[in-house]
Amino acid sequence: MTTTTSAPRTRRGRRARLPYVLLIPAVAVLAVGMGYPVYWQITTSLHTYGLAQQFGQPAPFVGLANYTRILGDERLWAVVVRSVLFCLVNAFLTVGIGVGVALLMRGVNRIVRVVLQVSMLLAWAMPMVAAVTVWKWLFDWRTGVVNWLLVQLGATSYDQHNWFAQPLSFFFVASVIIVWMSVPFVALSVFAALTQVPDEVVEAARIDGAGPVATFRWITVPMIRPVLAIVLLLQIIWDLRVFAQIRLLQDSGAPVSETNLLGNFIFELGIGRQDFASAAAVSILVLALTVLVSWPYVRSLLKEDRS
């Protein structure tokens, strides 16, 4: 009897351990692929590492001196505030527009839905450099379509208006580009979640007298909240690490010191000034800032998993 009951327990124990065993290769690859760069950044940030060290000179250990110098730099804090504000505004704007487009796809007929989905996939699949180049042409101060259209509508002050000369209008254009490139992912993800909302539940809410807004707020949102939390978390992480779009737009004559975000600031320190140690220190601070900003959403996801 003991042998008979112990055999199923052994099989159940093996089945319970099997998923963890299968995860070992993936975890090992992630640990090597992500662990080594983080280790290199931390090590570099604790040494003096400039152009001489690139050619084989020893890197003196300086401890936290790089962090102390960077944290005392007023330019860093201006860039941090600018980056966080830019990140949050774009992340929430992207998710809001993406949810609206997903609801639109849910409500239109099949032909219109397919057209919307194909259009978003094409926008999403467009190479980033090509997309930024097209938008730069549209907002060009000499031959741009945007200025021409605004002048035709009566806004004559926009005749040869340079959108990249002032930080506020520069970041407006940057936000348009980033939101345009990010909305397809959010819209398609939320639309997939909306298809899982039972029609019977929505119909029951309408029968009880709930309007479209109340149905969306009290029925739809709670059911798709996990997807909303994930896409918002991803957008915050991605928008906090924006680099290439800003760099390409700065080439149009923008004031670099007033339009740098964290990624561009790191690039300026490392590539521009050959101060790789300070760049590594700022990179570690960005990592910590990313964890800090995204932690509330990660915690909410963990709570939902436990429940």
Image: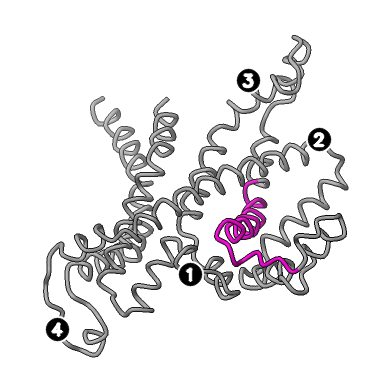
Residue at position x 57%, y 42% in the image:
92
Residue 136, above or below 17 = below
Q: Which mark is residue 58?
A: 4
Whether pointer 1 and pointer 3 mark residues with C-beta atoms closer than 8 Å, the reply is no
SS of the residue under disc 4: loop
Residue at position x 74%, y 9% in the image:
208
In percent of width and height, residue 235 lies at: 53, 49
Q: Horizontal placement of 234 versus 280: left or right?
A: right
**Membership of 161 in magenta stretch:** yes
Q: CA distance from mark 1 to mark 2?
A: 44 Å
How many numbered tags mark residues here?
Answer: 4
Q: CA distance from mark 4 to mark 2?
A: 64 Å
Which is nearer the N-term, disc 1 or disc 2? Answer: 2
Q: Horizontal placement of 300 versus 132: left or right?
A: left
For label 1, the residue is 256
Magenta residue span: 160-186
Q: CA distance from mark 4 to mark 3?
A: 62 Å
SS of the residue under disc 1: helix
Which is nearer the N-term, disc 2 or disc 3? Answer: 2
- Corner quadrant of residue 123: bottom right
Q: Which mark is residue 107?
A: 2
